[in-house]
Image (spheres, rainbow, N blue to C red):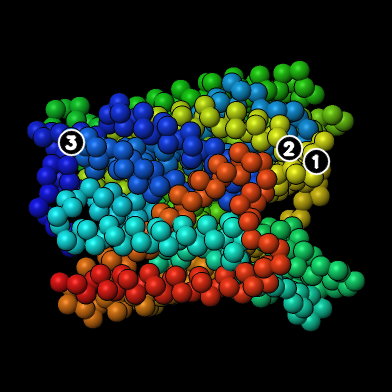
Amino acid sequence: MFSSSTTGAAAGTRPSASHPIKELTLRGIFIGGIITIIFTAANVYLGLKAGLTFATSIPAAVISMAILRYFKDHTVQENNIVQTIASAAGTLSAIIFVLPGLVMVGWWQGFPYWQSVFVIALGGILGVMYSIPLRRALVTHSSLPYPEGVAAAEVLKVGDTHEGADESRRGLMAIIWGGLSSAGFAILGSLKAVSTEVSGAFRIGAGGTTVAGSLSLALIGVGHLVGIGVGIAMIVGLVISYGVLLPIQTSGELDGVEDLADAVGAVFKSDVRLIGAGTIAVAAVWTLIKLMGPIVIGIRDSIRSTSLRGSGQEVDLTERDLSAKVVIAVTLASMLPIGVLLWLFAQGTAIAHSVIGLVIVSIIFILLTGLAVASVCGYMAGLIGASNSPISGVGIIVAIAAALIVKAVHGSVQGDQLSALVAYTLFTAAVVFGIATISNDNLQDLKTGQLVGATPWKQQVALVIGVGFGSIIIPPVLNLMQTAFGFQGAPGAGDKALAAPQASLISDLIKGVFGGDLNWNLLGLGAIIGVVVIIINEVLTRTTKNLSLPGLAVGMGMYLPMAITIMIPIGALLGLIHDRWAARQADPERAKRMGTLAATGLIVGESLWGVVYAGIVGFWGEQAPLALVPDSFETVAYWLGPVVFALVTAGMYWYSRKAARRA
């Protein structure tokens, strides 16, 4: 347990009506805005390059504490606001999984600034509004682990305690050493001194599969925090996709292939991921059905809290959300500018004659789909974390649903209408995707706020501010990337074009819906797998005490590349081993917490280096500007990587145990 001998700025102090705590401040907004610019730019680049983004809440919290500690009146709640602003904007950068599709299909040559700003901002603000009534259902009254939210809270609480408190100091050192270790390994990887991924491909009968693992200490930390249940479910999904589906889908397709790994990887991207998307879709719908009760209760409680405050009755500050009236008013009012954006987008195109019907249906689609998407994405973030939540899988389902509805309203497609309808659907899906990305992060932030005693409505205002910052910075960064590199598949793209894999896949799927060549059989197969997993999970949860098989986690294991997936279960297993060791110690809670802090440090260090390295790559314009080790060392680096990775991981768990044993 952390020392309770803290001042009003300490983590244990909670705001009250009579003793309000400094929380939403101008300096906090300013610092959050500056951090936002850096993190959002880095996330946009990395997302377009590798198809992955990183959660910015933890590094933002670390930077915030480093700055605000020089102000005597700073509080943990104020630091929490800074990370909330930065994480909202950083997460909003996932809009790059859809928006570049408009360039790829040749509809845009760049990203019109104000048009892009408004579509990003409106989707993000709706994401904040939709997540507010979900707070009670998915955060306050939920046992979801929220790995990044818990990790961010640990960083804030440890960083804000007195230096004289021995245990707090040891906890902070666990974070620091974990951060230095993971950042150090990542730096070695950037220098090409060690490999950061091991992989191989081999044949199974007439087909083939691959084995890969990303040597990411951050993923080990995430696995430790999410727990063994999610880890096992992801392994099940991994076995289904790489052990069963991939060999079947590649059967008879590999004769004469020169590069087995590339050929098998291409089938995974085109076929197996689509099956995984079908599993995620069914699991998402089932999750939504099961969440309807808690969601309704959460909305009812939110309205009740608003009524109590309106009648003058006292409500605990830590339970005060933005007024239900404000949420409803902002949500409905947002539909007007969205309608105007959609109407303007279609003007002068081959579908202008049917624009009224398309806009009306699109608004209804956004309004109704938003809550469903917010619920599912919030649940997934709570289950596995915002960084590793397969938000693009949800985006795929949203894009396909939007395309089907637009196609049904418009009717037969003729001539130039195909490209116009594809572009219009991408634009509509971008709004819903904005809701998804923010919901994927907001509840994580609200979990952090719950753990540090923050005021929900102030955090929700901070989230809107973060959306504003992100919306302003994302379009120029996208234009910079388009000008400097371009996107693969776009007209005139060069050799250095960025892959933007999610945007490419979603664009192709929408084209497939309108062109009639989408492989529904693969999606259907994934749906069947999802139904089977749901049945197994329901049987396990009803007949056993501790066993379960979460459908979304299985779908994640099927959809995500093995390189990412495999490390999370390994981290979960290491976490289980550590927690069982902790249970045998004199102070089990302290011992368990030291493991949590060490895992948090692993996430912090690699995330911070990710920001720095993205800036270096962007400045030099090269894929590997720090590759100082000669190519002749490549073979040694390949085998050295796993060895150093294992030693660093073992060293961090040894350190956490040593810190926990100290009196």
Residue type at the position of mark 2: Gly
> Residue 555 falls in which quadrant of the image?
bottom right
Classify mark 2: helix, strand or loop.
Answer: loop
Classify mark 1: helix, strand or loop.
Answer: loop
The numbered disc on residue 72 is 3
Residues at marks 1 and 3, CA–CA distance in whole angstroms: 53 Å
Nearer-N-terminus badge (1/3): 3
Viewer-nearest of discs 2 and 3: 3
The numbered disc on residue 494 is 1
Along the line of sight, the residue nearer the viewer: 227 or 634: 634
Q: Are marks 1 and 3 in contact (CB under 8 Å)?
A: no
Along the line of sight, the residue nearer the viewer: 305 or 54: 54
Q: Which quarter of the rendered picture does the C terminus lie within? A: bottom left
Asked if one can make out residue 414 in the rendered structure from this viewpoint, the answer is: yes
Kindly identify the residue that appears in the image at 50 percent across and 70 percent down.
Answer: 645
Rendered view: 240 above or below 94: below
Kindly identify the residue that appears in the image at 75 percent across and 68 percent down.
Answer: 261
Q: Are marks 1 and 2 in contact (CB under 8 Å)?
A: yes
Residue type at the position of mark 3: Lys
Viewer-nearest of discs 1 and 3: 3
Counting from the top left corner in percent of width and height, residue 505 is at 71, 48
> Residue 75 falls in which quadrant of the image?
top left
Asked if one can make out residue 305 in the rendered structure from this viewpoint, the answer is: no
Rendered view: 571 above or below 125: below
Nearer-N-terminus badge (1/2): 2
Kindly identify the residue that appears in the image at 76 percent across and 60 percent down.
Answer: 266
Q: Which quarter of the rendered picture does the N terminus lie within? A: bottom left
Q: Identify residue for label 2.
A: 486
